[in-house]
C-alpha cells in the first residue's frame, strides 16, 4: 500500500509516516493519504512520488483561487523582496491597510473596524473576548454542530463532540448554550414537517426565558452553513431569525465565515443569502491566499472594547500574507469567481444528486456553491453514519487520482478551488462517484482503514 521513494534525501512512505507520528503531537493533525505534496498549480498537486492528483479539498478549504495562482505568487514575491515583516503591532504597512479597507467594503459592516490574527481559531477567540468585554456579559449562545476554534472560548462555543472532550479535559469556559441547528437531513426534532420552524420555535422559547429572567447574552455565534460537522445547510431564513432573536436581548451576532467566506458558497459571504447585517464577521482559511492570516471585522464600538494591545499578535497583519490576501480577493473580483462558484455548485449538486438516486450508500447531497457534502449512510432509513465506508471512498478516490476529505466521520467534503474548470470539476466528481461505486461493490479492502484516519 505504501510506495517507497526518495525525495531530496528523505525516504517517503511508511518510514516517513512513522517519523511523522513519532515527532508530531496527535492533537495537531490527522491523516488522510500517504503522499507528500511537493508542487501544486491550479486544482492539481504533485506528490514526491511523481503522481498528480486533482484536489477537491483545496487543502482544507484554503486555496480558493487554486494553488499558486500567478497573481498571488507575484504579490507574495514582490512583497517578500521589499520587506518580509515589520510588525504591524508596532508599525504600519500598506498591504494591511489596503486589505483591511477592502474587507470593510465587501463585508458591508458599517462603522466597522478590523483586527488581524493568524488562524480562524484566534479570530473566534478574539471576537468572543470582545463581545464579553463590550457587553459585560458571559453567556454565549451557539448552535449544535457549530465549530469555531480550538482555544478556550472558541472551543467551548463549538458544540461538537471533539471540543466537548477538550473542554472536559481542560475545563473550558462553561457559559455556553448550544441550541438546535436546523439540519434538514438529520433534524434534531425528529421527523417533523419543517425543521427550520421547530428550531426557530426552540430558539424563541429560549430567548423568552432569557427575557423573563433578565439574562443578556454576550453574543450569538453561528456558522451560516456548517462546515466541519458535515456541510450542513440550515433551513432557509435561519440566520434572519438568529439576528431577530439576538436583537430582543441586545446581543451582537457573530457570523463565522472562516470556511464559507470569500465566495465559496456562491456569495461573497453566506450570511448574504439571508440578507442580514452581522455585528461581527470572522474570516480565516482562504484569507491569506495560503499564508496564515485571519481577521475579525465588526462594529467599531465592539472592536474597541478592550485596551490597546490586548489582542495583538506579533506576526499578525504580516505584509506578505496581506498582499497574498489582497491579490486573492482581486482575482475573485476580476475573474467573476463568486458567480462562478454558484454556477459550478449548481452543476456539481445536480450531477451528484442524480448519482445518489441510484446509490443507497449516499444518503444525502447538500451544499451551496462549491461547498458540498456527500453524506454516506449504512441504511437510508436509519441514516446511520457509514464511517468506514467514507474512509474507503477517500482511499479509493486517492488511488484513482482525486483528493477528497471526510468530516464528521462519514461526510465527503467537496470544496475545490472556485476557479476550477467545469471539465476538471466534472472529471473529479465522476471519479469520486466511481470510488463510491467501488466501495458499494465491496471492491475496497480494510487496508484503507489503516491509512485514512480522518476526523
Ligand atoms: C467555521 C470554522 N471556524 C473556525 C475554524 C478554525 O480555524 P483554524 O483551523 O484556522 O484555527 C474552522 C476550521 O476548520 C472553521 O471551519
Image (cartoon, helix red, strand yellow):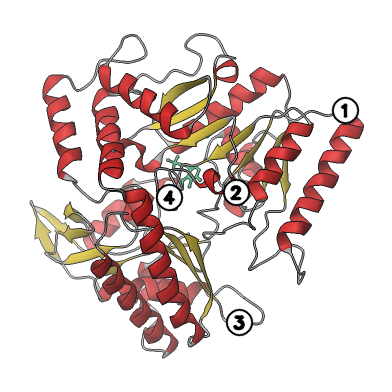
In terms of sequence position, does the residue under pointer 4 or pointer 3 come before the other?
4
Observer-side mark, 1 or 4, equals: 1
The residue lying at 13 percent from left, 32 percent from top is 77
Check the image and name the residue furthest to the left: 8
Query: Real-space Cα distance between discs 1 and 3?
Result: 44 Å
Quarter of the figure that contains the N terminus: bottom left
Q: Is residue 407 visible?
A: yes
In terms of sequence position, does the residue under pointer 1 or pointer 2 come before the other?
2
Name the residue nearer the viewer: 260 or 2.
260
CB atoms at circles 1 and 2 under 8 Å apart? no
Residue 91 image position (x, y, % from top left): 31, 9
Q: Pointer 3: what residue?
A: 380
- Callout 1 crowding tier (Cα within 10 Å): few <14, some 14–19, many ≥20: few
Check the image and name the residue furthest to the bottom: 441
Query: Real-space Cα distance between discs 3 and 2?
Result: 24 Å
CB atoms at circles 1 and 3 under 8 Å apart? no
In the rendered view, does 262 fall on the left or right side of 185? left
Q: Pointer 1: what residue?
A: 214
Observer-side mark, 4 or 2, equals: 2
Residue 283 image position (x, y, % from top left): 45, 36
In terms of sequence position, does the residue under pointer 1 or pointer 4 come before the other?
4
Q: Is label 3 in a helix, a strand or a loop?
A: loop
Query: Real-space Cα distance between discs 1 and 4?
Result: 43 Å
Query: Real-space Cα distance between discs 1 and 2?
Result: 26 Å
Residue 279 image position (x, y, % from top left): 59, 29
Q: Pointer 2: what residue?
A: 146
Q: Is residue 320 above or below residue 6?
A: above
CB atoms at circles 4 and 3 under 8 Å apart? no
Amino acid at each position: 500500500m505504501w510506495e517507497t521513494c526518495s525525495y531530496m534525501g528523505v525516504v517517503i512512505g511508511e518510514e516517513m509516516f512513522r517519523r511523522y507520528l513519532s515527532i508530531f503531537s496527535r492533537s495537531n493533525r490527522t491523516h488522510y493519504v500517504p503522499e507528500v505534496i511537493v508542487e501544486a498549480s491550479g486544482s492539481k498537486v504533485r506528490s514526491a512520488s511523481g503522481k498528480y492528483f486533482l484536489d477537491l479539498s483545496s487543502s482544507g478549504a484554503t486555496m480558493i483561487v487554486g494553488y499558486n495562482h500567478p497573481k498571488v505568487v507575484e504579490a507574495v514575491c514582490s512583497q517578500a523582496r521589499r520587506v518580509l515583516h515589520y510588525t504591524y503591532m508596532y508599525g504600519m504597512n500598506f498591504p494591511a491597510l489596503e486589505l483591511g479597507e477592502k474587507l470593510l467594503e465587501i463585508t458591508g459592516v458599517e462603522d466597522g473596524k478590523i483586527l488581524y490574527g493568524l488562524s480562524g481559531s484566534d479570530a473566534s477567540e478574539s471576537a468572543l473576548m470582545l463581545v464579553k468585554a463590550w457587553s459585560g456579559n458571559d453567556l454565549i449562545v451557539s448552535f449544535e454542530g457549530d465549530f469555531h476554534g480550538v482555544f478556550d472560548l472558541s472551543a467551548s462555543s463549538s458544540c461538537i463532540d471533539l471540543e466537548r472532550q477538550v473542554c472536559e479535559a481542560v475545563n473550558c469556559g462553561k457559559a455556553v448554550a448550544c441550541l438546535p441547528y436546523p439540519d434538514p437531513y438529520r433534524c434534531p426534532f425528529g421527523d417533523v414537517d419543517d425543521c427550520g420552524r421547530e428550531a426557530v420555535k426552540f430558539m424563541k422559547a429560549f430567548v423568552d426565558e432569557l427575557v423573563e429572567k433578565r439574562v443578556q447574552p454576550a453574543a450569538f455565534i453561528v456558522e451560516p452553513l456548517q462546515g466541519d460537522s458535515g456541510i450542513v445547510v440550515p433551513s432557509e431564513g435561519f440566520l434572519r431569525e438568529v439576528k431577530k432573536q439576538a436583537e430582543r436581548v441586545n446581543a451582537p451576532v457573530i457570523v463565522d465565515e472562516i470556511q464559507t467566506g470569500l465566495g465559496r458558497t456562491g456569495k461573497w459571504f453566506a450570511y448574504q443569502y439571508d440578507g442580514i447585517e452581522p455585528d461581527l464577521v470572522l474570516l480565516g482559511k482562504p484569507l491569506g491566499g495560503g499564508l496564515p492570516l485571519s481577521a475579525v471585522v465588526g462594529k467599531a464600538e465592539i472592536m474597541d472594547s478592550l485596551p490597546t494591545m490586548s489582542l495583538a499578535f506579533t506576526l499578525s497583519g504580516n505584509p506578505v500574507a496581506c498582499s497574498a490576501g489582497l491579490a486573492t480577493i482581486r482575482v475573485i473580483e476580476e475573474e467573476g469567481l463568486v458567480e462562478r462558484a454558484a454556477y459550478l455548485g449548481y452543476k456539481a449538486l445536480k450531477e451528484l444528486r442524480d448519482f445518489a438516486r441510484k446509490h443507497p450508500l449516499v444518503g444525502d447531497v447538500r451544499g451551496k456553491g462549491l461547498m458540498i457534502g456527500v453524506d454516506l449512510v449504512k441504511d437510508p432509513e436509519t441514516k446511520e453514519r457509514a464511517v468506514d465506508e467514507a474512509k474507503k471512498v477517500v482511499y479509493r478516490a486517492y488511488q484513482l487520482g482525486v483528493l477528497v476529505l471526510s468530516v464528521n466521520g462519514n461526510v465527503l467534503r467537496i470544496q475545490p478551488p472556485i476557479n476550477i474548470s467545469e471539465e476538471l470539476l466534472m472529471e473529479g466528481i465522476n471519479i469520486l462517484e466511481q470510488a463510491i461505486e467501488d466501495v458499494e461493490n465491496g471492491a475496497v479492502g480494510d487496508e484503507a482503514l489503516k491509512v485514512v484516519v480522518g476526523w
